[in-house]
Amino acid sequence: MPGDTTIVFGVPVPSVDPVFLAVVRFHIIVGIACVAAGIAAMLSHKRRGRHSTFGTIYFWCLAMVVTSATGLAVVRWAENNHLFFLGALSMIAATVARTALRERWRNWVRFHISGMGLSYILMLTAFYVDNGKNLSLWRELPQWAFWVLPAAIGLPVLLYAFLRHPLSSTQGAGNLRR
Protein backbone atom coordinates (compact mmCIF):
# COMPACT_ATOMS: atom_id res chain seq x y z
CA MET A 1 0.00 0.00 0.00
CA PRO A 2 1.28 3.51 -0.75
CA GLY A 3 0.72 4.62 2.86
CA ASP A 4 3.04 1.91 4.12
CA THR A 5 6.08 3.30 2.30
CA THR A 6 8.39 6.11 3.41
CA ILE A 7 11.00 7.83 1.25
CA VAL A 8 14.37 7.94 3.07
CA PHE A 9 17.13 9.85 1.25
CA GLY A 10 15.30 9.23 -2.02
CA VAL A 11 14.89 5.48 -1.41
CA PRO A 12 11.41 4.01 -0.89
CA VAL A 13 11.33 2.02 2.35
CA PRO A 14 8.37 -0.33 2.93
CA SER A 15 7.64 0.89 6.46
CA VAL A 16 6.30 3.79 8.46
CA ASP A 17 7.65 2.53 11.80
CA PRO A 18 9.87 5.30 13.26
CA VAL A 19 12.36 2.88 14.87
CA PHE A 20 12.76 0.89 11.66
CA LEU A 21 13.20 4.13 9.69
CA ALA A 22 15.82 5.41 12.16
CA VAL A 23 17.82 2.20 11.63
CA VAL A 24 17.43 2.60 7.85
CA ARG A 25 18.71 6.20 8.01
CA PHE A 26 21.69 5.11 10.12
CA HIS A 27 22.32 2.21 7.73
CA ILE A 28 22.33 4.51 4.69
CA ILE A 29 24.64 7.11 6.25
CA VAL A 30 27.13 4.50 7.47
CA GLY A 31 26.88 2.70 4.13
CA ILE A 32 27.86 5.88 2.28
CA ALA A 33 30.79 6.36 4.68
CA CYS A 34 31.80 2.73 4.08
CA VAL A 35 31.78 3.12 0.29
CA ALA A 36 33.77 6.38 0.51
CA ALA A 37 36.34 4.94 2.94
CA GLY A 38 36.76 1.86 0.76
CA ILE A 39 37.43 3.99 -2.33
CA ALA A 40 39.85 6.18 -0.39
CA ALA A 41 41.74 3.11 0.88
CA MET A 42 41.88 1.61 -2.62
CA LEU A 43 43.25 4.82 -4.14
CA SER A 44 45.77 5.58 -1.37
CA HIS A 45 49.40 4.53 -1.46
CA LYS A 46 49.72 1.17 0.26
CA ARG A 47 51.62 2.10 3.37
CA ARG A 48 51.00 3.34 6.88
CA GLY A 49 48.94 6.48 6.94
CA ARG A 50 46.02 7.16 4.64
CA HIS A 51 45.59 3.60 3.39
CA SER A 52 45.56 2.02 6.83
CA THR A 53 43.39 4.82 8.29
CA PHE A 54 40.78 4.58 5.53
CA GLY A 55 40.99 0.77 5.64
CA THR A 56 40.23 0.80 9.35
CA ILE A 57 37.34 3.21 8.81
CA TYR A 58 36.04 0.94 6.02
CA PHE A 59 36.25 -2.15 8.23
CA TRP A 60 34.37 -0.61 11.17
CA CYS A 61 31.78 1.09 8.95
CA LEU A 62 31.24 -2.26 7.25
CA ALA A 63 30.74 -3.87 10.67
CA MET A 64 28.06 -1.27 11.46
CA VAL A 65 26.43 -1.67 8.03
CA VAL A 66 26.30 -5.45 8.41
CA THR A 67 24.95 -5.16 11.96
CA SER A 68 22.20 -2.76 10.91
CA ALA A 69 21.47 -4.84 7.79
CA THR A 70 21.12 -7.91 9.98
CA GLY A 71 18.51 -6.15 12.12
CA LEU A 72 16.66 -4.89 9.04
CA ALA A 73 16.78 -8.33 7.40
CA VAL A 74 15.48 -10.09 10.52
CA VAL A 75 12.42 -7.81 10.62
CA ARG A 76 11.65 -8.55 6.95
CA TRP A 77 13.37 -11.95 6.65
CA ALA A 78 11.30 -13.36 3.77
CA GLU A 79 12.07 -10.30 1.60
CA ASN A 80 15.64 -9.58 2.76
CA ASN A 81 17.40 -12.76 3.90
CA HIS A 82 19.69 -12.63 0.85
CA LEU A 83 20.94 -9.24 2.05
CA PHE A 84 21.91 -10.77 5.38
CA PHE A 85 23.96 -13.45 3.61
CA LEU A 86 25.67 -10.95 1.29
CA GLY A 87 26.51 -8.78 4.29
CA ALA A 88 27.81 -11.72 6.31
CA LEU A 89 30.01 -12.87 3.42
CA SER A 90 31.30 -9.32 2.97
CA MET A 91 32.20 -9.09 6.66
CA ILE A 92 33.86 -12.51 6.63
CA ALA A 93 35.99 -11.52 3.63
CA ALA A 94 37.04 -8.24 5.29
CA THR A 95 37.81 -10.02 8.56
CA VAL A 96 40.01 -12.60 6.81
CA ALA A 97 41.79 -9.76 4.96
CA ARG A 98 42.35 -7.77 8.15
CA THR A 99 43.48 -10.82 10.11
CA ALA A 100 45.95 -11.81 7.36
CA LEU A 101 47.47 -8.32 7.56
CA ARG A 102 47.59 -8.08 11.33
CA GLU A 103 48.97 -11.57 11.90
CA ARG A 104 51.22 -11.51 8.83
CA TRP A 105 50.09 -14.81 7.41
CA ARG A 106 52.20 -16.36 4.70
CA ASN A 107 51.13 -14.53 1.50
CA TRP A 108 49.23 -12.06 3.67
CA VAL A 109 49.23 -9.37 0.97
CA ARG A 110 47.35 -11.65 -1.41
CA PHE A 111 44.80 -12.53 1.27
CA HIS A 112 44.45 -8.86 2.14
CA ILE A 113 43.91 -7.66 -1.43
CA SER A 114 41.55 -10.53 -2.27
CA GLY A 115 39.55 -10.29 0.96
CA MET A 116 39.08 -6.54 0.92
CA GLY A 117 38.26 -6.54 -2.79
CA LEU A 118 35.69 -9.31 -2.42
CA SER A 119 34.26 -7.58 0.65
CA TYR A 120 33.72 -4.38 -1.33
CA ILE A 121 32.18 -6.23 -4.30
CA LEU A 122 29.78 -8.12 -2.01
CA MET A 123 28.78 -4.93 -0.21
CA LEU A 124 28.02 -3.18 -3.52
CA THR A 125 26.15 -6.25 -4.76
CA ALA A 126 23.88 -6.09 -1.71
CA PHE A 127 23.29 -2.39 -2.33
CA TYR A 128 22.38 -2.85 -6.00
CA VAL A 129 20.25 -5.95 -5.42
CA ASP A 130 18.25 -4.00 -2.84
CA ASN A 131 18.21 -0.56 -4.49
CA GLY A 132 18.96 -0.99 -8.19
CA LYS A 133 15.29 -0.88 -9.09
CA ASN A 134 15.13 2.65 -7.63
CA LEU A 135 18.20 4.11 -9.38
CA SER A 136 17.78 6.01 -12.63
CA LEU A 137 20.21 4.10 -14.87
CA TRP A 138 19.91 0.77 -13.09
CA ARG A 139 16.09 0.58 -13.07
CA GLU A 140 16.16 -0.24 -16.79
CA LEU A 141 18.21 -3.39 -16.15
CA PRO A 142 16.84 -6.86 -15.38
CA GLN A 143 17.05 -8.11 -11.79
CA TRP A 144 19.87 -10.56 -12.59
CA ALA A 145 22.08 -7.61 -13.59
CA PHE A 146 22.01 -6.29 -10.02
CA TRP A 147 23.57 -9.59 -8.92
CA VAL A 148 26.13 -9.87 -11.72
CA LEU A 149 27.36 -6.38 -12.68
CA PRO A 150 29.20 -5.47 -9.44
CA ALA A 151 31.26 -8.66 -9.76
CA ALA A 152 31.64 -8.29 -13.54
CA ILE A 153 33.16 -4.85 -12.98
CA GLY A 154 34.90 -5.48 -9.66
CA LEU A 155 36.56 -8.85 -10.29
CA PRO A 156 38.70 -7.64 -13.21
CA VAL A 157 39.81 -4.67 -11.09
CA LEU A 158 40.57 -7.02 -8.22
CA LEU A 159 42.44 -9.38 -10.54
CA TYR A 160 44.47 -6.45 -11.88
CA ALA A 161 45.37 -5.35 -8.34
CA PHE A 162 46.18 -8.91 -7.36
CA LEU A 163 48.41 -9.64 -10.35
CA ARG A 164 49.99 -6.25 -10.98
CA HIS A 165 50.37 -4.60 -7.62
CA PRO A 166 54.02 -4.72 -6.53
CA LEU A 167 53.08 -5.78 -3.00
CA SER A 168 51.42 -8.97 -4.20
CA SER A 169 54.70 -10.28 -5.57
CA THR A 170 56.80 -12.44 -3.31
CA GLN A 171 59.55 -9.81 -3.12
CA GLY A 172 57.20 -6.86 -2.59
CA ALA A 173 55.26 -8.53 0.21
CA GLY A 174 58.14 -8.29 2.62
CA ASN A 175 58.79 -4.61 1.91
CA LEU A 176 55.54 -3.10 3.14
CA ARG A 177 55.61 -1.31 6.46
CA ARG A 178 52.26 -0.93 8.16
Image (tube, rainbow, N blue to C red):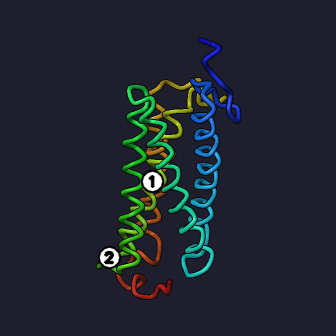
Badge 2 amino acid: Asn
Mark 1: give few (<14), some (14-19) or many (20+) Cα within 10 Å.
few
Q: Where does the image place residue 122, in percent across and percent down from the top left?
A: 44, 48
* Location of mark 1 (residue): 156
Q: In terms of sequence position, does the residue under pointer 1 or pointer 2 come before the other?
A: 2
The answer to whether 111 appears left or right of 153 in the picture is left
Question: Label 1 vs label 2: CA separation?
Answer: 20 Å
Q: Where does the image place residue 81, in percent across and percent down from the top left?
A: 38, 34
* Location of mark 2 (residue): 107
Residue drawn at (42%, 83%), measured in percent from left and top?
172
Q: Of residues 10 and 166, which is closer to you in this image?
A: 10
The answer to whether 54 appears left or right of 117 in the picture is right
Q: Where does the image place residue 58, in percent across and percent down from the top left?
A: 55, 61
SS for tag 1?
helix
Q: Is residue 150 above or below residue 141?
A: below
Badge 1 amino acid: Pro
The answer to whether 114 appears left or right of 51 in the picture is left
Q: Of residues 13 and 128, which is closer to you in this image?
A: 13
Q: Of residues 83 and 135, which is closer to you in this image?
A: 83
Q: Residue furthest left?
A: 106
Residue drawn at (46%, 41%), measured in percent from left and top?
71
Residue drawn at (39%, 30%), measured in percent from left and top?
77
Q: Is residue 35 above or below residue 140?
A: below
Q: Classify the position of the N terminus by image quarter.
A: top right
Residue drawn at (59%, 36%), measured in percent from left and top?
19
SS for tag 2?
loop
Mark 2: give few (<14), some (14-19) or many (20+) Cα within 10 Å.
some
Q: Residue furthest top?
A: 1
